Each structure stands twice: as C-alpha cells, then as structure tokens.
Amino acid sequence: MGDMHPYYLQTLRGLVLLSEEIPSDQTLLMRMAEYSGRFPEDVPKKYRDSFAYLVGRYLYSSGEYEKALELLKFVQPGSKYYLPARYISGVTHVGNYDGKAAVAAFKDVLRPLTQKLEEGDLNVEERALLEQTWLGMARVFYSTGEYNKSLKYYGLIPRKSPSWPLALFESSWAY
C-alpha cells in the first residue's frame, strides 16, 4: 500500500535485518531502494551504514550512478561497509567518466589496506578488495593515457592471485 500504510516505516527495519542475512538478494535490495528517498531521516541510525552501502551498490548495478553516489557517501569511516562503499564509489565514478574522483575514492581504500598488507594483517576479503582496487586504479590510469602509472598498479598483482592472468592480459595493452 506504499508509504501511507501504518507499517511502512517499520517494514524498513525488517528489510535491513533481512539484508544482513541475505545481502545479495536483488528483490530485497529493490524493496529497500524504495525507501532511498527517506534516507537518512527515516532510517534508524544504527542501520544507516548498511542501508547506504547495500542500496548504493544496488543502484550502481541498476545504472543509477548519481543516486548510488549520493547514498554511498553517507557510509562512515570505521564502518565495516566503508571500504567496500568507497570501492563501489570509485567504480561508479569510472562509469561517469570522472577519473579524478575515481582515483580519490580508490585511494581511500588503498591507504588502510596497504598499511594492513605491510603489517601482514590482511584477511582474505580485504586481500581481494585490495587487488580489485589495484585493478581499478590501473584501469583508470590506462584510460587516461598514463600508461606507466597503469603498469605500476597492474604490477602489484601477485602471480599467485586469481586476478594475475587478467592483470597480465590488461597490462599488455599498456605496454
């Protein structure tokens, strides 16, 4: 019945809780996206980061780049969603042909993950995000004609990584 129904806002809390259990369910994310116009006011504070990240990621996948960026910028540093949100923001900026903003977003991901790498403290998910961010940086620099910078980032992908064959192939174009 839409936002006129007395349980409309209460349903949002249930949707967010469900999304924590099944974060990739597109139907669920589509329903959550219906509430994006009421963000952040009507989204409980403790769910704002997860809502902004999940709905922002969904909107990105739907091609609604500007709406995605609006939500993703609300994810707070220190949240478990912050680095993935910054990565998706970088990719979204690439989709908008805004290389400068993409690099800035990717650097927000690289700083803490590079430090954790140097300390030997990366978990598997963080390692995958780091490698995807290196690929993102390499692609941005390739697209702007900065081939040496592009090669630098492609060269960071280790041979044992599942991303290495792709990095090797893509770097051949920069050469």
Image: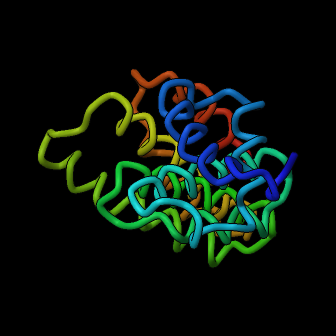
Which residue is pictured at 86% across the width and 53% down the height? Answer: 63
Furthest residue in direction front, as rendered: 6
In which quadrant will I find the N terminus? top right
Location of residue 167 in the rendering, given as x and y in whole percent from the top left corner: 59, 37
Circle count = 0
Q: Name the residue nearer the viewer: 139 or 150.
A: 139
Q: Is residue 77 above or below residue 5?
A: below
Which residue is pictured at 63% across the width and 78% down the height? Answer: 100
Q: Is residue 18 above or below residue 160?
A: below
Q: Is residue 38 above or below residue 61?
A: below
Which residue is pictured at 84% across the width and 51% down the height? Answer: 2
Which residue is pictured at 48% across the width and 33% down the height? Answer: 20
Q: Is residue 129 left or right of residue 148?
A: left
Location of residue 61 in the rendering, given as x and y in whole percent from the top left corner: 78, 45
Location of residue 67 in the rendering, given as x and y in whole percent from the top left corner: 76, 66
Location of residue 166 in the rendering, given as x and y in whole percent from the top left corner: 63, 30
Q: Is residue 54 above or below residue 165?
A: below
